[in-house]
Amino acid sequence: MNTNRKPSRPWTAASLALVAALLLTACGGVATTAAPAPPTEAPVVSPTGPLVVLEWSGYELPEFWMPFAEKYPDVKVDYSFFVDDTEAFAKLQSGFGADLIHPCAGWVPLYAENGLIQPIDTSRLSNWSGVPEILAKRGQVDGKQYLVPWDWGYESILVRTDKVKEIPDSWADLWDPQYAGHVSVFDSGETAHVITALALGLDPWNTTPEQNAQIKQKLIELKPNLLNYWADFTEIHQLVASGDVWLAGNAWNDAYVSLRQEGVSLDYITPKEGRLGWVCGFAISSQAKNLDLAYAYLDAVLAPESMAYLSNEYAYGAANAEALPLTDAEFVSLFSLDDPTILDRVVFYRPLTDEQRELFTSTWDDVKAAP
């Protein structure tokens, strides 16, 4: 990962002429002809960039921002990559000079409270009208829009239908003894807390100390069913494909699609408590040097063609509903992307307090250390 790219500013013809003039003067040269008369109007200067984007690896593909490239063919878009929001947040805090950043919604209040991002004027985005209100609200802090939603997706349970006698229909089924030794859940204290609270019929974000203790004990009781805790896409993909894992908790859209394309017999259920959901998008750094270019890039990634490429490439939901006619019909059907009420039935992750983050982390450490 290259996190220290510092592109040089491109030289314009005017810049070169100025340098030549300065060199001539320094060498004692004397002009033999009169200087041309100054123009009556100031010339129009195009933005030169570079535009610096702090980004997840994989989203730098030009197909995601083609309208920007067509409008500004001479502007360089310079990417610096991060592996998670923790790293991205730390980079901005340390003074990294980005114009745009691609955080997830749960982190947006933290970025805003620390003065790292600025409110977004959505009237400058011609493609904003296609963003559903339920997604737009995920990027708001105190009524101001700080995030342009872009990608969203599910977390649910992948089931090897050829390995189980009964298809689960609840997060609570992860604890069913008939799946002993063949369950895997994501290695995350936050997600573990959320799915366990849902299995117990609790509000994951408003639990009491007594309920937190109940959740911790319930997670310890899950351990006999677990083959392991999975940490990345390739790991859970291989475990489900091999048949070692029959129920994969917290799996994402792309895992389902890729395994399905390989001919694996499986289902991606909708638990009765709801699938979990995440929303990520783009924010403008409070220290952005190229504000006009930042808005142009935001509008480009929101374009229907850009958004459809996201859905067709990664099977994630697009924030712009106008991308649906351009999206693979199979994906639309698999994930009910054409159902305007689907987002109302998703349990979206919410911003956490520092106390909640610390609690979930310490609880998860204790659970994994328990016999």
Image (cartoon, rainbow, N blue to C red):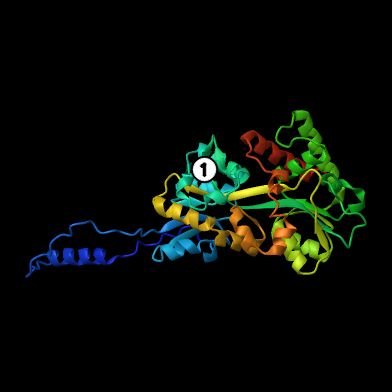
Give the structural element (helix, strand or loop) at label 1: loop
Q: Nearer the viewer, residue 14 or 123?
A: 123
**x, y percent for residue 363:** 73, 39
Q: Quadrant of residue 195?
A: top right
Pointer 1: what residue? 146
Q: Quick check: can you spot residue 235?
A: no
Q: Quadrant of residue 30?
A: bottom left
Q: Quadrant of residue 32?
A: bottom left
Left or right of 363: which side holds 11? left
Locate the N terminus and report the quarter of the image it occupies. Answer: bottom right
What residue is rendered at 71% in x and 45% in y?
A: 346
**x, y percent for residue 183:** 83, 53
What residue is rendered at 70% in x and 39% in y?
A: 360
Left or right of 228: which side holds 107? left
Q: Is residue 125 above or below residue 193?
A: below
Give the amino acid at mark 1: Tyr
**x, y percent for residue 156:** 76, 51
